[in-house]
Image (tube, grey):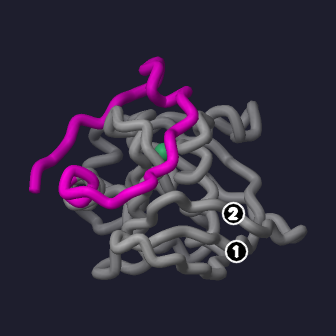
Amino acid sequence: MAKLEIVCDGHPTLKKQAKSIRKMTDEMRLLADDMVETMLCSNGVGLAGNQVNRPVRIITVMHAQDDVRVYINPRILKFSKEVQYGDEGCLSFPLLYGTVCRADRVTVQAQTLDMKKVKLDAEGYLARIFQHEIDHLNGITFTERAEPDTFYTITRKEYEEDIEDGEAPEDTSSGDKEASQPADDSSQAG
Ligand code: NI
């Protein structure tokens, strides 16, 4: 496995609509392995193909500290009317956070690495990760979703201290950053 380079704010691939994956190949399996490694090395809780400059419909999602899953062609079938507000960050926007309103629960349809169809319900923090990562596949980043006056940045030092403490930086996007499950609201880096 290898750690891949994560593309950041301003990179055109972040704006691309990712392509569906029709067939599982060795190349795609390798990409999945590398994305899992990249997400874990970066203290992320989610990662999308676009973020490693591969605009294909694949995401990695941390369900729990030792439970990372790969989803192919994920799609949200249903959004709850109830919403949640939480701070998000993103591995493609290092150190930047903002408050994003998301559906509290979603029903996701996807395929596993062996291309079997799966359907699952997610709520709270996990639902936020799915919404953040699937947005990436549609060329949308959390910066377009966040409430405009809620953006804040932390310093590299603060970020590293949070990691040392085993805390998620107060934000992260599902995207991508931290793995701990905040008890109160959600932060995610992805
Ligand atoms: Ni992200």
On the image, the x and y values in percent for residue 24 come to 32, 60
Q: Residue at x 50, y 56 (%)?
A: 174
Q: Residue furthest right?
A: 81
Residue that numbered label 2 is attached to:
76
Q: Residue at x 83, y 71 (%)?
A: 80
Camera-nearest residue between 155 and 13: 13
Q: Specify the segment rendered in magenta.
A: 1-30
Secondary structure under the numbered disc 2 in the rendered image: strand
Secondary structure under the numbered disc 1 in the rendered image: strand
Does residue 23 belong to the magenta stretch? yes
Is residue 148 depicted above or below 138 in this figure?
A: above
Q: Quadrant of the N terminus?
A: bottom left
Residue 168 can be seen in this image: no
Residue type for callout 1:
Thr
Residue 107 is marked as 1
- Badge 1 crowding class, 10 Å Cα cut-off, few under 14, some 14 to 19, many 20 or more, is some
Q: Are marks 1 and 2 in contact (CB under 8 Å)?
A: yes
Label 1 CB sits under 8 Å from any ligand 1 atom: no
On the image, the x and y values in percent for residue 111 come to 48, 70
Q: Residue at x 61, y 80 (%)?
A: 119
